Image (cartoon, rainbow, N blue to C red):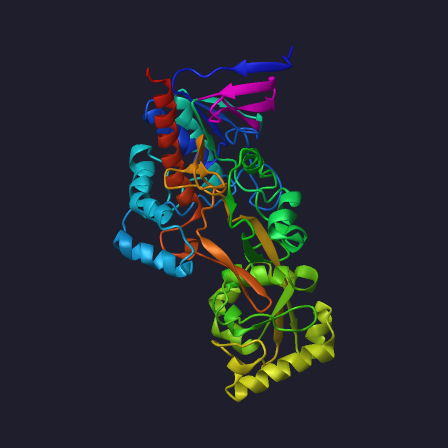
Amino acid sequence: MQRKSESVRAMSGEVLVIGAGMAGLVASLEAVAAGSRVTVIDKLRSMAEEKVVPVLPGGPGNDTAKSGGAGLGRFESQAPVEQQLEEHLERSWGQADPDLIRAYLERIVDDCRWLRDELRAPYVSATRIRGMGPGLCRFLIKEVSKRKVTLHFETRATELITDHRNAVVGAKASGPRGETEFYGGAVVLATGGFQGNQEMLVKYAGPEMAYGTVLTGCPTNTGDGHIMAVKLGAQMINVSACHVRTMDALHARGPSRAMENIYPRGIYLNMECRRFLDEGTADSDTIANAIVYQPGHKAALVFDEATRAAFPDEWKKYPNKEKTIQLARSLEHLAEKIGVDPRTFTATIKQFNLAVAQGEAHLLPVPKTRHATKIERPPFYAFYPVLPGLNHPLGGLKINAKCQVLNQDNGPIAGLYAAGVIANWAFGKQYRLGDVISFKGSYHAPMASGLATALTFGRIAGRNAALEALSRSAPS
């Protein structure tokens, strides 16, 4: 019989980790190495029990399991830390937190070597883990199990517990054992983003982001950790910025990620046949963010035979073209195929072609500053629809370089740490340029990726949580 309520008391120096993705599991390993006992709780089934973890939207899996298991091959530094730091700051328009980025850059090479050489993670290439994201999860679960970490799956944390000093000492949770209280000398939050919580998306990122995107990230990431921490006064930053990428109707990568030479030479049109961004300079994230705010939250990439023929390998490699790319001998017929007004469609393209011919594409109402190419040689192509796929928010709980969660006064909340997507790992700012809303962040800089930041900050969080837990249990 399930007990209605149970209390799992902490032993001396114990750390409670909430979330069993990359950040939470490496935090557990690091806390054990620092001398702590560790308990991990996660609301999902163990990834070790999931035979199939779909990369497409929906289905089981956390952010780590749904990743490609790549971005963890930073075995050699390409430049001195200060030089890399400068580039990160430049790419984020000076909005990045230099202390966080420096902590990351100083550690990431050693962290990747630790994963490969000490843990002996099953790399199948210089950057990728065998079995991709699911393989990485299974490997890390196996490693924490070897170290006698206590794992409770299908156990959802619902509230953080504090002591008389307002220090975090545990969490309430619900699961197979009923309502349970888990205690520890410190708590690490590694619960991912809030992309699966439309109420939070509307509040922080706006209704367009909540309802105008295809959810490609984990639907089970519903902001549990954010909600619990905010109740204790935690600070959230950059939460309006989201990681959004272009995709096609079949959830493949989309032209701005898979046709890197074709797409900047075409033009993106919304359903009113208007251009809405500079295709020559916009990357996949910027394009996807812009599409979110277009009518119908979709767009068409239009190009001609001259552009297609110039890059045959890109064209050949893209899958399911017959289902995602329309082809016609005339612009009018192409417009009919994608369901827009032929007159407006052809007028927009003629205006664009004239500006290109006169060398004035950069003077158009929506300028095109690079790769301005006329669309005039049939057949004509429309990659349609191009959709915005929402991976996860880029902002989150504000942390310092020790991964301590900060309150509204930028002071640490005692006993509370965070790592992974739940924390503000993007280190940048949202920006608007005309109708375009996107994110400028240092995660675009070299040696940055979601898994890599989860690895580094997960280890930092685990070690510092262990040190705090052990210091609390030490005799005064």
328 left or right of 80? right
Say if the magenta span includes residue 260. no
Residue 267: horizontal and vertical position, in percent? 58, 73
Q: Which residue is located at x 35 percent, y 45 percent?
A: 104
Q: Which residue is located at x 64 percent, y 61 percent?
A: 293
Q: Quadrant of residue 364?
A: bottom right
For this orientation, the residue located farthest to the top is: 1
Q: State the quadrant of the C terminus.
A: top left
- For the record, the magenta segment spans 159-184
Q: Which residue is located at x 46 percent, y 34 percent?
A: 137
354 left or right of 475? right
Relative to 82, residue 173 above or below: above
- The answer, for residue 126, to whether it is visible in the render is no
Instruction: Tell which of 166 and 246 is nearer to you.
Output: 166
Q: State the quadrant of the N terminus.
A: top right
Q: Quadrant of residue 142?
A: top left
